[in-house]
Amino acid sequence: MSRIVGIDLGTTNSLVAYVDEKTGLPRVIPDRDGQVLLPSIVSFTGEGVLVGAAAKRQLVRRPASTVYSVKRLMGRGYEDVKEELCYLPFKVLPCEGIVKIQIEGRDVTPPEVSAIVLKSLKERAETHFGEPIEKAVVTVPAYFNDSQRQATKDAGRIAGLDVVRIVNEPTAASLAYGLQRIREGLVAVYDLGGGTFDISILRVKDGIFEVLATNGNTHLGGDDFDRAIVLELLEDIREKHNVYLGRDLEAMQELRLAAEAAKMRLSADERTVLTIPFDGFTYHREIARADLERLIERLVDSTLAPCRMALADAGLAPSDVDEVVLVGGSTRVPLVRRRVQELFGKTPHSQLNPDEVVALGAAVQAHILAGGITNMLLLDVTPLSLGIETLGGIVSVLIPRNTTIPTNARELFTTSVDGQRVVDMHVVQGERELAKDCRSLARFELSGIDPMPAGMPKIEVVFLIDANGILNVTATELRSQKAAAIEVKPTYGLSETDVDRMVEESFTYAEADVEARLLIETRNEADTVITHVERALAQGRQLIDDDEYRSIAAALATLKDARATSDRDRIRDATTAMNRATEHLAELMMDAALKGALASRRADEIMEK
Amino acid sequence: MDHFEVFGLPRRLGIDTGELQRKFYELSRRGHPDFHQGAPAERQAEILEASARLNAAYRALRDPIARIEYLVRLEEGRDTREGATVKPKAPPELLEEMFEIQEALQEAQSSGQPGGLEAGATETLVAQRERLRARHEQEEARLRGPLSQAWDAAGPAERAGALTAFKESLAVRAYLRTVIDDIDEALGRSQEGYVSHRRH
């Protein structure tokens, strides 16, 4: 069996991992520069498509064509996301049930953007192994519905990956922990990432990881913490500097990145200072951890209700849980840890890096599927009830939430009018009684029924939720034992032909020369450094003597010359030399609490770690 | 193959759940699709089908009440859920109280401001919910205990009677559940972070 890698396709960062045959342990694969996390960001520039850290550097420069947090849009309709669109600098439009992102001269769907991230990880793995990689296990939030899972699978296909399994993130994490860290018993996995929240309750026994219940919110995460900080900063800036930056895309990106960096620093420090240079003024603000906690408390507390519901569904009290595991970057926030500890009454585990543990678990599941592990088995559940709309818009539940998958349900359908040849059904997911309050998955049309008096035909429809949590429907006319024809119209999703077309297109775009892309990245990096140095010299000239000024100016001139060539190594060396030449100046500016000009650059560095 | 047969069990309600779980894990280990990824497509389809059947069987049998609901369906020869919903029926001894609760609920819902219910109404509803929960628990205990034992002990002639008793009791339970859910919803709207979440 060919090699299968495990991929965590995150809201903020993505990673790829595999199980080392020698040690039997999962390992993440770093990129050329030793970085493990690939920022889930894609920038569409006139010269080509950038992904990861290179795209991240475009956030401020090209806000309208740099796409981030696209996971929040996967498998969603316009109505689902329209309220948060005002926070996104790129344009999102409705498009036949789903949404598309409008970039200069090109429209892309969320699966296509995710495909670019997946493709980059695929290439990273291929470089590492020196062989083509065609199969992957990809993780999704446990609370993802059918459309969101399908969209993730589509993204894999567009990237040229056969997604052999969609695995839930918290359960993947439990597999990684299960290899070595946790005892047998009842385990709660609390997973708060960049954009999604999951809680899963598992029973671990004899190598079997049985999920008892899962709950969550696919629209809650670190992004929302950042947003709460940004809103506060916007108000503060309005008061202090009498200017409202809410409609300035570039300023908003600066604010968002600064807020994110400040939030991260406050996980270790009691207080931190934000310094952001804007046109005409530099904004300073001190934030204490208590301030942050006041801003995000409501969001953190809103994760507790899903925890209680999952426990109730599992028939457990919080104190029954033997082990609590924290997953996702946002669980570094001290308030989150406190709340989880209070709820379960025990210290949670966080020995494994919360950014990496999901990818490690995906690698374990990949190894199980490849036949490399035979003593571990994951039994997951479907997070949402599946039902069909019946008379009066009432939902009849066929498969209740928290049913172990794969699972199926059968239902008999018949006709209501003499000679009727077609029967429609509307499949929904959710916990509400009325179909209109649930998530519409698809409309199915059973056709080719032989004309008979009403009620005579008997069509058995089998609803199968596979191990990916994705619905498959088949139908048989019982009288003739003939498979009935089914036409599926997914409510939120790409059609088969759409995906095929995107697979084609992705090849055309991917053929762009790798070397050319690397050159663009290197040039962009140089541009960023040049901008920052020029700003620093303008603001911090008085802090350094003439010798130092001259050596910085010389390094700057060298870098600019190098930038004009197509020699990637030369540009990179000049950039490194430039950074070294300004180290002292940067320190002085920091000391003087005037770190303004280099702050966002520094923030970038801190965040990339 | 019915759910009892999947586990090699007779059609009886007295089941040792620890033993059932052990068997479930053993059968999963043997037949889970994860361990048969290399099999030909046709074989994989069979494995998937068998795995789905095992999971459905475990779910139906592990919970004593779900077990009864399944048994009733099976005994009545309904393999699908068509017409399976037991019509909720108000428990006769509570009829009057039920009527009052429904009325209070409607009143609370139409007059209550979006912010929540009045303190007095909340208190009444909470107290009534407690009573209904106790009654619900009592009905489930009856289903799990004496009624289940009656079925297991019944000869062929007494089975019809035992089934009728199940159906009546399930209908009462469903009714209580609905009213409790309605009260939950009315009370929940005034609580932060509340998500409407039905039980099945």
Image: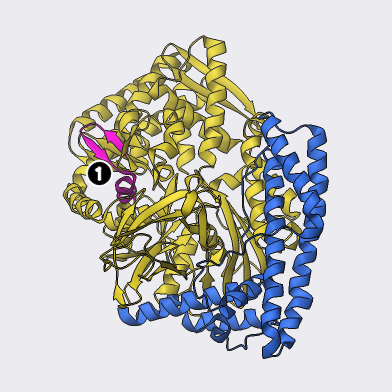
Chain colours: A yellow, B blue
The spot of residue B53 in percent (x, y) is 49, 77
**Which residue corresponds to mark 1?**
A518
| Closer-to-camera residue (A187/A447) | A447
Question: In the rendered structure, which amino acid carries the disc numbered 1?
Answer: Leu
In the image: residue B148, left or right of residue A393? right
Q: Residue furthest top?
A: A242
In the image: residue A240, left or right of residue A335? left
Toward which corner of the image does residue A310 lie, by quadrant? bottom right
Residue occupying the point 30% across, 43% down? A109
| Closer-to-camera residue (A332/A568) | A332
- Note whether B161 is above or below A151 in the view shown: below
| Closer-to-camera residue (A219/A369) | A219
Residue occupying the point 55% across, 66% down? A403
Tell me if residue A62 can be seen: no
Toward which corner of the image does residue B103 lie, by quadrant? top right
- Note whether B156 is above or below A127 in the view shown: below
- Note whether A322 is above or below A333 in the view shown: below
- Please state the total of marks drawn on the protein image: 1
The spot of residue A83 in percent (x, y) is 46, 32
Q: Chain of mark 1?
A: A
Residue occupying the point 54% across, 42% down? A220
The spot of residue A146 in percent (x, y) is 42, 56
- Give SS at disc 1: helix
Residue occupying the point 66% across, 59% down? B88
Range of magenta residues: A100-117
Quarter of the image for the N terminus of chain A: give it.
bottom left
- Note whether A479 is above or below A57 in the view shown: below
Asked whether residue A587 is drawn in magenta, I would say no
